Amino acid sequence: MTRILIVKMSALGDILHTLPAVTDALKHDPSLQTDWLCEEPFADIARLHPGLHQVIPHGRLRWKKRRLAFATLKEQWQFYCGLRRNQYDLVIDAQGRIKSARVGWLSGAPVFGADEQSATDAETRHVYRQGYPITEVNAIERTRELFGKVLGYQPSGQPDFGINTERLAACPPEWQGQLIFFHGTTWDSKHWPESQWCELLELARRAGQKVLLPWGNDVEKQRAERLVEAVGWGEVLPKMSLWNLSGVIAHCRGAVGVDTGLMHVAAGMGIPTVAIFGSTSVALTGAMGRQVVNLQTDYECSPCRQKVCPKLENGVPPCYTTMSATKVWSELLILAEKRV
């Protein structure tokens, strides 16, 4: 039996994008004992894959707040001692960053990843036992190719996220069969205008289709409340863990979202999903799943791939104003009808 450690620490969408590579690896060698190390807030997303032996939450985000405190140093020492006791045969650094390569190296096992031309941080070459050239463009396919080269197989077929929705948290009956709108995102440049979200809610109201709006922080909660108040339609979900929210998503009739992690979760589950891309690229991070439509905005500088838009108009990235709620709604209806 080969014991491997996957290091993909963050963020939510990036972790979701790695699940198909895990499916490929276990299909190639079902005897693999695979652990996954990720940052604590995203552990529930890694746990979506039932083939993992264990998910190991990493405290980096907590530790850096009190980097030199004795309690932090003690916890780090105990963490890495425990990691070494697992005696992994190899580590796959699926992140390609110094932070992830260093964590992999501290496990005591040889680390493999993308070569210096393909990794995000070229300095990782000093840590890896071997780096591999990666030719694919899309994030999901890049990771599948990396796993295949490290473990000695050729990935094929459509990405399989391996998510077994029956394992997830139960969804209350009153939330089942609804739409879910993912309006929140970490990049300021990825926000669809609130006016368009309101119009989309209005279209759902006219159709008698209830809508759920999740949130992950106070800013997102306030936005969700504004949208519901403006239209008089939709329900702001309570604060919940990613595991519980995943259980809700699995029972939704359809989803709409900007390029954000939870939208990719819905797509990976096979929920009919319309994804809106402006500053980011469909070619690089487009959602994948059985029923997905990726919509790229039509604007001169889209996709710019910048976290902060230099051309904001009344606080809104202009590229997103070219994507109408009517277009999004029509695409969602087409997907929903196909599902039926």
Image (cartoon, rainbow, N blue to C red):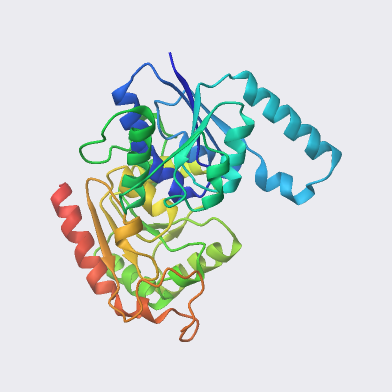
Query: Which percent across, then down, holds residue 224?
Result: 48, 65
Residue 39 appearing in the image: no
* Spot occupied by residue 145 in the image (x, y as percentages of width and height): 32, 40
Q: Is residue 40 above or below residue 179?
A: above
Q: Nearer the viewer, residue 244 or 152?
A: 152
The residue depicted at 56 percent of the width and 49 percent of the height is 123
Q: Is residue 293 left or right of residue 43?
A: left
Q: Quadrant of residue 197?
A: bottom left
Give left or right: position of 85 versus 25.
Answer: right
Instruction: Answer above or below: position of 262 versus 251.
Output: below
User: From what the image shows, is residue 90 above or below residue 116?
Assistant: above
Residue situated furthest right in the rendering: 70
Name the quadrant containing residue 71: top right
Image coords of residue 141 (percent x, y): 31, 46
Q: Residue 69's spot in the image, x, y percent?
A: 84, 43
Front-lying residue, 133 or 223 = 133
Please state, as top left, top right, bottom left or bottom right, where the N terminus lies in the image.
top left
Extreme residue in the top direction: 1
One can see residue 146 in this view: yes
